[in-house]
Image (cartoon, rainbow, N blue to C red):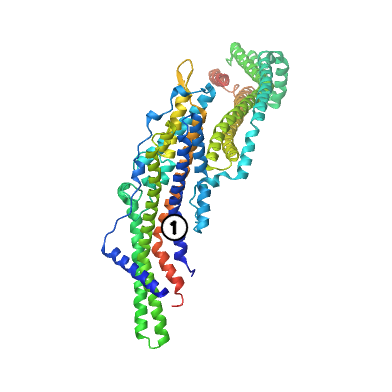
């Protein structure tokens, strides 16, 4: 067990309590000095001088207090002087490090403005390019694009055309069948066959038009790329402006808080320049952080907008592909059924072995089916 | 001779101990109201606008005004906070040092009415809690020492060996001394607080007397008399306003502030805030050290008598 606990305790307590006594007498002494200084003159200069004297004297309280305590051997481990109150805040290394940040504000302003100008030029070029592409690009390249689209559709397109041609062939066969002795009285009229052919042609035309839409794919990709580049350039331009603004605001903030820091230094009797640098550095860092956060937010927004463009493009392609698949499947089903029906009507003995009434009913049913299928096909 | 002196001290402390037990002493506690209620800074001594030599430029004036008003805002906010515990006055450095700010009164044993430990704040609950902890600690310490005294007395009574008896006797004397010290520590605390308060009062009276004697000095001097820092802070604020002039911003005329008085005012303000922070720290340390006083005495006894 440690000895002399009571003595240590009392020393600490007395040191803390009598700090006030020491400071009170010091203040009384300062008071006397200031009274003498002021009593000789009433000018502003004398008042300022007295004020400054009071400030310097008050700022030295901590040191004098420690000196007196040391002399009487009652130095407290806890401190209790004004010097200890805020001293930790103003470490020299920190001040130097923080103060350095303020020096790059001029560079920030210049760099920011330059970046903004360059980005603005790039933005104008990109916007012009986009305009040209939107106005003339599609028209000029339409023919080439149509050809490209046909190639791009590949097997799917060929199948569509095959199917359509098959359908048209069959329809022509049906017309021949109608005119032949075998088909006599079947009841498939020439106009109905024409209608079928017309529908098939229309189908072919729709497919070709869809293929032409595909042609625009190349331009659409180019446009998307341009839009993304424009977003990037816009962000770069804003970032430049933001950087320049940050430089200006940081300078103002650093000047303001730096002055406050200098005042704290003056009040504390500590290194005024170091305190000013600390204050300026803290303000500079705080404002810079705010601008950095805001820049990150803007970057994020730009990335998001670029992703939106990509997503929208993918959605469009997906929809188009799905439509084409659906349409192709439906057409295939329709034509296969038509083909089977006509073949069976031609080849089987169904027609021969039936009465003319039955045959008429069967053909009527067939016609209805064909019409329904064509209608369904046109609905797609 | 040395033993006699020791006996006298112990006897003296015994008297204190009985006084503590049989009386309800609540003395010594007060803040320095004399200094606090000194005549305020007088408007008549405010700087004369005619004596203004140079008006600051618009930009400098407006920037100074921004600093000045921020300072004033801080002053008002702190004053308002002080108003929660006592008079709503800004705790300028001299008020703090001359023990005029009730919230910084460390004397929790006999607190001033408006101090943090007094009845003025939260109905005195904080002070009551601290006092309860302190007196509970004191009771535990007394009980602990009482039991040890009883055990040693029994041991001494039943002991037949002379050397052992002598050792127990010595031990009982140490214990009794500690018991006296336990009660004495309470008085020691009260006395230390009292001594500090009185010394501070003496120092503040020196200032008050100078203030009265120097009433004939110049306007700045009179201002400073009414409290060095409190007066000067207010004085420089008014001076900054009076010397600032106005700037015409087409829409409206806005006051400017003179930069030098602004800086002086702000430095006084910051210095006062530092003192406030420092004295709050002191308040906390003293409260903790005071509360542990009974345990310190017990530990001191244990350190002395490990062999017993």
- Quick one: A179 or B228, which is closer to the camera? B228
On the image, the x and y values in percent for residue B262 come to 49, 31
Hey, which quadrant is residue A135 in on the image? Answer: top right
On the image, the x and y values in percent for residue B227 come to 41, 39
On the image, the x and y values in percent for residue B240 come to 47, 28
Q: Quadrant of the C terminus of chain A?
A: top right
Please give the name of the residue rendered at 63% of the width and 41% of the height, measured from the top-left corner: A96
> Is any atom of residue B247 visible in this view?
yes
Please give the name of the residue rendered at 53% of the width and 37% of the height, measured from the top-left corner: A263
User: In this rendering, is residue B79 above or below A139?
Assistant: below
- Quick one: A215 or B179, which is closer to the camera? B179
Q: Residue furthest top?
A: A191
10 Å crowding of disc 1: few (<14), some (14-19), many (20+) = some
Question: On the picture, is B99 further left or further right than A332?
Answer: left
Task: Quickly name the residue at label 1.
Answer: A14
Residue at disc 1, secondary structure = helix
User: In this rendering, is residue A342 above or below A255?
Assistant: above
User: In this rendering, is residue B233 above or below A26?
Assistant: above
On the image, the x and y values in percent for residue A13 come to 44, 58
- Quick one: B167 or A346, which is closer to the camera? B167
> Is any atom of residue A333 visible in this view?
no
Question: On the picture, is B108 further left or further right than B57?
Answer: left
Q: Chain of mark 1?
A: A
């Amino acid at each position: 067990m440690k000895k002399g606990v009571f003595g240590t305790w009392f020393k600490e307590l007395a040191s803390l309590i009598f700090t006030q006594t020491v400071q009170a007498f010091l203040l009384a002494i300062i008071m006397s000095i200031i009274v003498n200084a002021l009593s000789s003159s009433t000018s502003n200069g004398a008042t300022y001088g007295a004020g400054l004297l009071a400030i310097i004297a008050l700022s030295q309280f901590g040191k004098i207090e420690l000196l007196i305590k040391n002399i009487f051997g009652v130095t407290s481990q806890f401190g209790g002087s004004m010097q200890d109150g805020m001293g930790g805040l103003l470490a020299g290394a920190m001040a130097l490090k923080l103060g350095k940040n303020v020096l790059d504000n001029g560079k920030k302003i210049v760099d920011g403005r330059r970046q903004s100008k360059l980005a603005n030029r790039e933005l104008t070029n990109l916007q012009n390019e986009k305009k040209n592409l939107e106005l003339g690009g599609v028209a000029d390249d339409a023919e080439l694009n149509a050809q490209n689209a046909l190639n791009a559709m590949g097997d799917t397109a060929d199948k569509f055309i095959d199917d359509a041609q098959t359908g048209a062939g069959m329809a022509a066969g049906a017309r021949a069948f109608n005119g032949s002795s075998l088909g006599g009285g079947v009841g498939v009229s020439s106009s109905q066959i024409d209608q079928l052919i017309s529908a098939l042609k229309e189908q072919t035309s729709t497919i070709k038009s869809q293929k032409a839409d595909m042609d625009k794919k190349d331009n659409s990709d180019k446009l998307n790329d341009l839009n993304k580049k424009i977003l990037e350039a816009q962000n770069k331009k804003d970032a430049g402006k933001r950087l320049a603004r940050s430089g200006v605001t940081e300078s103002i903030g650093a000047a303001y808080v730096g002055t406050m820091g200098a005042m704290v230094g003056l009040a504390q009797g500590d290194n005024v320049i170091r305190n000013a640098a600390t204050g300026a550095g803290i303000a500079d860092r705080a404002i810079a952080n705010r601008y950095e956060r805001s820049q990150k937010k803007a970057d994020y927004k730009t990335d998001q907008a670029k992703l939106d463009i990509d997503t929208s493009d993918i959605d469009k392609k997906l929809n188009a592909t799905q439509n084409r698949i659906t349409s192709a499947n439906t057409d295939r089903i329709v034509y296969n059924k038509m083909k089977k029906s006509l073949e069976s009507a031609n080849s089987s003995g169904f027609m021969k072995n039936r009465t003319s009434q039955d045959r008429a009913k069967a053909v009527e049913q067939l016609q209805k089916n064909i019409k329904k299928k064509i209608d369904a096909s046109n609905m797609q | 001779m040395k033993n006699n002196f020791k006996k006298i001290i112990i006897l003296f402390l015994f008297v204190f101990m009985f006084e503590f037990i049989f009386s309800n002493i609540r003395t010594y506690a007060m803040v320095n109201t004399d200094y606090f209620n000194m005549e305020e800074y007088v408007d008549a001594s405010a700087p004369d606008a005619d004596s203004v030599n140079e008006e600051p430029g618009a930009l400098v004036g407006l920037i100074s005004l921004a600093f000045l008003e921020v300072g004033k805002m801080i002053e008002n906010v702190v004053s308002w906070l002080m108003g929660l515990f006592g008079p709503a006055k800004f705790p300028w450095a001299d008020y703090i040092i001359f023990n005029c700010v009730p919230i910084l009164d460390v004397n929790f044993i006999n607190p001033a009415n408006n101090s943090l430990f007094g009845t003025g704040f939260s109905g005195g609950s904080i002070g009551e809690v601290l006092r309860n902890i302190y007196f509970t600690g004191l009771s535990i310490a007394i009980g602990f020492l009482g039991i040890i005294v009883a055990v040693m007395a029994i041991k001494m009574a039943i002991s037949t060996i002379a050397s052992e008896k002598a050792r127990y006797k010595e031990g009982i004397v140490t214990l009794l001394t500690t018991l006296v010290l336990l009660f004495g520590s309470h008085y020691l605390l009260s006395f230390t607080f009292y001594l500090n308060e009185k010394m501070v009062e003496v120092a503040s009276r020196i200032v008050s007397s100078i203030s009265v004697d120097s009433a004939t000095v110049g306007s700045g001097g009179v201002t400073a008399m009414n409290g060095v820092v409190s007066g000067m802070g207010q004085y420089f604020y008014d001076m900054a306003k009076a010397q600032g002039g106005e700037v015409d911003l087409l829409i409206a005329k806005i006051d400017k502030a003179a930069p030098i008085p602004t800086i002086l005012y702000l430095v006084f303000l910051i210095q006062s805030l530092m003192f406030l922070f420092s004295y709050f720290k002191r308040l906390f340390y003293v409260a903790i050290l005071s509360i542990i006083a009974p345990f310190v005495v017990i530990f001191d006894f244990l350190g002395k008598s490990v062999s017993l």
